[in-house]
Image (cartoon, coloured by chain):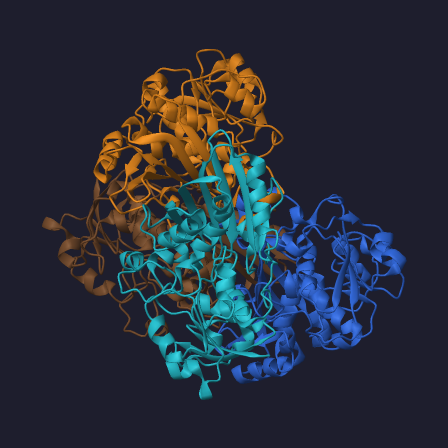
Chain colours: A orange, B cyan, C blue, D brown
Amino acid sequence: MTVRAAVAGASGYAGGELLRLLLAHPGVEIGALTGNSNAGQRLGSLQPHLLPLADRVLEATTPEVLAGQDRRHDVVFLALPHGQSAAVAEQLGPDVLVIDMGADFRLADAADWEAFYGSPHAGTWPYGLPELPGARAALEGSRRVAVPGCYPTAVSLALFPAYAADLTEPEAVIVAASGTSGAGKAAKPHLLGSEVMGSLSPYGVGGGHRHTPEMVQNLSAVAGERVTVSFTPVLAPMPRGILATCSARAKAGVTAESVRDAYAKAYADEPFVHLLPEGQWPATGSVVGSNAVQVQVAHDSAAGRVIAVAAVDNLTKGTAGAAVQSMNIALGLDETTGLSTIGVAP
Amino acid sequence: MTVRAAVAGASGYAGGELLRLLLAHPGVEIGALTGNSNAGQRLGSLQPHLLPLADRVLEATTPEVLAGQDRRHDVVFLALPHGQSAAVAEQLGPDVLVIDMGADFRLADAADWEAFYGSPHAGTWPYGLPELPGARAALEGSRRVAVPGCYPTAVSLALFPAYAADLTEPEAVIVAASGTSGAGKAAKPHLLGSEVMGSLSPYGVGGGHRHTPEMVQNLSAVAGERVTVSFTPVLAPMPRGILATCSARAKAGVTAESVRDAYAKAYADEPFVHLLPEGQWPATGSVVGSNAVQVQVAHDSAAGRVIAVAAVDNLTKGTAGAAVQSMNIALGLDETTGLSTIGVAP
Amino acid sequence: MTVRAAVAGASGYAGGELLRLLLAHPGVEIGALTGNSNAGQRLGSLQPHLLPLADRVLEATTPEVLAGQDRRHDVVFLALPHGQSAAVAEQLGPDVLVIDMGADFRLADAADWEAFYGSPHAGTWPYGLPELPGARAALEGSRRVAVPGCYPTAVSLALFPAYAADLTEPEAVIVAASGTSGAGKAAKPHLLGSEVMGSLSPYGVGGGHRHTPEMVQNLSAVAGERVTVSFTPVLAPMPRGILATCSARAKAGVTAESVRDAYAKAYADEPFVHLLPEGQWPATGSVVGSNAVQVQVAHDSAAGRVIAVAAVDNLTKGTAGAAVQSMNIALGLDETTGLSTIGVAP
Amino acid sequence: MTVRAAVAGASGYAGGELLRLLLAHPGVEIGALTGNSNAGQRLGSLQPHLLPLADRVLEATTPEVLAGQDRRHDVVFLALPHGQSAAVAEQLGPDVLVIDMGADFRLADAADWEAFYGSPHAGTWPYGLPELPGARAALEGSRRVAVPGCYPTAVSLALFPAYAADLTEPEAVIVAASGTSGAGKAAKPHLLGSEVMGSLSPYGVGGGHRHTPEMVQNLSAVAGERVTVSFTPVLAPMPRGILATCSARAKAGVTAESVRDAYAKAYADEPFVHLLPEGQWPATGSVVGSNAVQVQVAHDSAAGRVIAVAAVDNLTKGTAGAAVQSMNIALGLDETTGLSTIGVAP
């Protein structure tokens, strides 16, 4: 079976990473590629690392182009600005697999959506983080997928086993640093190389970041009670990668062994999550270009906390890899097809 | 008055930064410079950025060299490996100002020292973080100074106003990322440029870092009760800078205003600590080469936490700048002499 | 004597670096600061590293503001887009020292100007590279100064001694890599941190870069014949610094000794140019934030070429430091006042 | 057919990159992995990005281990220090394909070898740069391959079409900047992250770099006369990538068109060399992790030179990718098997 895929937003970082993965996917044929302000341009000038697609020309992002002639596209990936996916998806029909790499369908709570995004809630689609309890089943056969945010991916995978095993109090404290590609390709002064190299800076401090309610949603579902999240994102001087350092107060009776057991059990059968041997800690450099997640956890008995760290590539497992992994599940392909656990290092 | 200064450990990063500052200090004459394995080498080959000292040759680190002919050195700065300062200081006599940039005399609790450093406790000297309550007075006229660790400097300045004003519970959670110079100049594989560029990695997770008891000591003294500290250090892909993201649960009745007032009051008269205007967050790139500290604080009412962030240059305010600031106070010079609040950016 | 200085273009990288230097200059009082689109904003939000000026508000760039109330400014620095300096300078009167950090008055040849900049030639002012033969004398007492381009500064200082001593053929081959601040602070996609980190890329290859005729002008004047220049600039993943690797075929009879002698003689009395000891090569990291130039030269007898390398900080000696150095000369101050040869490393 | 491969030197950067590629090669089964000082360690601690091999343990580098039980290895890759390959290869027998990623068998001229490497010449093996005239044929069926140096790969591919078409004089001037992985994984102070980030520095200037005679050999063979090479390598602040800027004086009658035609013709059928469209220049960031080479060329009529630039990943096409490409050819597999032209960007 060959799956024919269209990509809306092919000139950005998420779109570029998706195309890199799709080119290596043995079951995918790349169909229409669309851009917005870049329609009409060669992909070779916009994504010079994608040599096999260098002569492709971006088309305008319309439902007709995305559906394809005679509705030939089986999958449509949407890497669009927030708020634009619903209108496009509606016109694609229920038989096309639509995978939204934006935020529109991630949150179940309409009030949360409106508070953080300031527009009407579009709805909720099956959530493309198959490692979460219940998520994989919801993706099977689905024709709609909401790809998680990059920070919530790292944070949820770092912490959910602790909540699933009832090891931690429902107040999580998270500091997560991201490479600059997470901020996108639109030229803004604070994202200039001159500004970011040699500097670390937090932003959206104090609960304002839009990924916060998504973390609350994921962790609360696992914990069976509302988990509050203190989330501080930090912009780091590197193109790719998220390092999420997460902690919560340990419940009574928790030990180093019970913590490790919980994580070992949670990830025993997961193809992309790698619990490191004791004493080895994740490094974002080890997962660049890979769909792998490196996780490690410790029990700090003096401070009374469980500390879990996850490293992901924000563009791969954090965005485009999750999209491909979800596509594989939705279409009944092997979940790992076209995805690698091997990083490009150093 | 001209102060004659000797520097032990002139070939390392702390020693180099100290020399950079002393060269710009109008009241200091640079005397003997010593190294260990580098004795006999030109400073120009070891610290090629210090052009005015390029032809100086490193001497061996002996008490005689550090005291100077006819005991002419007024100040001796020690940038030595942990455990070596006490023996040297003893032989320098009580009239020489000895400023230890190592850890030996930072901790008041001998058991803490032994648990974290594994050697007998050498004692406790006045602590070179003048912004802490009581610290400045203890430094005045002293002939011994213990320069704080770089992480404890950033963390203590981020959090002490919250504890001083009784705003926060005594459980601090800290994630602090540091540039690589904090790990020193000894060649180790994990510090190679190939390894660190493009990667973020935590280390010493779970309470094991030697700077943890120093943070506990500083915050507890201000809080008037024992503050536990969960501290996760992260190695970041940049040469200089520490960004400390610190939080603690807010006590009842705390508001955004009460938090801001506490910080504004704490730092109103401090020449090197700059509380940023509301909404602007620290960036390590803004304090490179400067003795300034950028601080910002927020109250996250949803998570119930006070979040404070500080940015320092680990080599300047985090080490060598603190040494010079302490020297100024100890000798009765203007505290800011030879120190700048201006960063080298971009 | 206190010199009162105004700065047009205070929000950009050149303007920010100039302010950093002027703040450390004992004879300068900083007057009006102007911006264009940023007029009305606090400098603290635009240049957060310049703490002492954080509360200054940018004014509009008008001749009245730049002249100052009662024409009180003695010096006006112009960091404006190309083509705007002449009109401003005319209205400032002949008694004000006007230092143009743009390109408008660098080239003597009107045809060169028009070919490379596409606008009418504004004229030629004394050239702010005092190390070039004759340049220092022309700056003394002048009330107009054209600050050199950053690449021509590095290249001219690397190569002019070889031409002055008639060691090399008049065909220079230059590859010079620059940090990203040389491209300015305007947000453009190819200057995003995500794009520049981890990547080296040439631009303006084949003679098209606007700094080429300036190099030809400088080297030809010294050589006494037209020197052709093959110049390839490269964008490098670092905020600051230029490394210029320059070579030309050696004339008959040239030896390693004659080459070294020529450079030693040329720079024996220059306060800012440091000919490194044999075998040590320049590194841009050693001159960050400094007005120093590191130079080294070799004779490759197998290839028959003289190879000279210079490292400068493009913002300091390459722009703002040269402006201050020229101001000092023009006003009869000590040439080195307020300038340092000490880099901020690592 | 499945090829069983052993790798000597699996803990270094070249070995790690080779394993990354072999893991993705559908026709290769990875056999013994050996190290030297690292024998006995888990690969997961040495190469944490190679998750599928995390539990492999390094063996000692002996002929027996490399041959494999019952001589089962079909291919042995040697990533050993210079001078060690000959002794190992001899004991492996003539039927095993031995691919030397070191320098030992690259140079045809024994005097060149001895002058630059200071040891007896081991011999000359077919040269693993199939794009050079005649090289591909020599590799077919060979059981010995000398993988080219990383700089000579970039430089030869940038310049040989100009010499093949008789467009340029036999004096090439080359400045090539490399990421730090080219210097290997041995911990040396000048390769520390603190030293390399934010800095560019040349080394081996004036003809001393060991890759110089290899460039001379390659270009001279194509030109049919001795080509002199002035080569300046530069260490750049990035982990991977080489940007080679190469030029030579244009012969009479050369035009922009004749230059472009020569390159278009040379690379029309090469799967890994991509001549960029006019006006677009190579960037190392576009070829990270890829076996592709980006090439562009210009004729600078004012300076009278042809300027050619190539970007490669020093670890992939510059080392391990060339090894796999050569293996494919030697064994009669499709040349592109297991190799990608897609970079990991940004």
Is any part of residue A314 visible from this angle? yes
- Quick check: D260 above or below D174? above
Coordinates of residue D8 in the picture (x, y in percent): 23, 55
Between residues D221 and D89, which one lies in front from this camera angle?
D89
Q: Residue furthest bottom?
A: B70
Looking at the picture, does residue A201 appear above or below residue D219? above
Furthest toward the top, the residue is A94
Taking the image as shown, residue C186 lies to the left or right of residue B244, namely right
Q: How many marks?
A: 0
- The answer to whether residue D318 is visible is no
Give coordinates of residue C221: x percent, y percent: 73, 73
Of residues B91 and C53, the one nearer the viewer is B91
Q: Pick out the residue farthest to the left.
A: D70
Is D227 located above or below residue C204 in the figure? Answer: below
Q: Quadrant of residue C26?
A: bottom right
In the displayed structure, does residue B124 sit left or right of residue C155?
left
From the image, which quarter does the N terminus of chain D lie in? top left
Q: Quadrant of residue D20?
A: top left
Q: Is residue C37 left or right of residue C192?
A: right
* Quarter location, residue D169: bottom right
Q: Position of residue B288 (x, y in %)?
A: 55, 57
Query: Looking at the picture, does residue B28 appear above or below residue C69?
Result: below
Residue C298, image x, y percentages = 52, 76
* Foreground of the two, D86 or C10: C10
Q: Residue at x 27, y 73 (%)?
A: D120
Q: Which one is in front, B319 or D196? A: B319
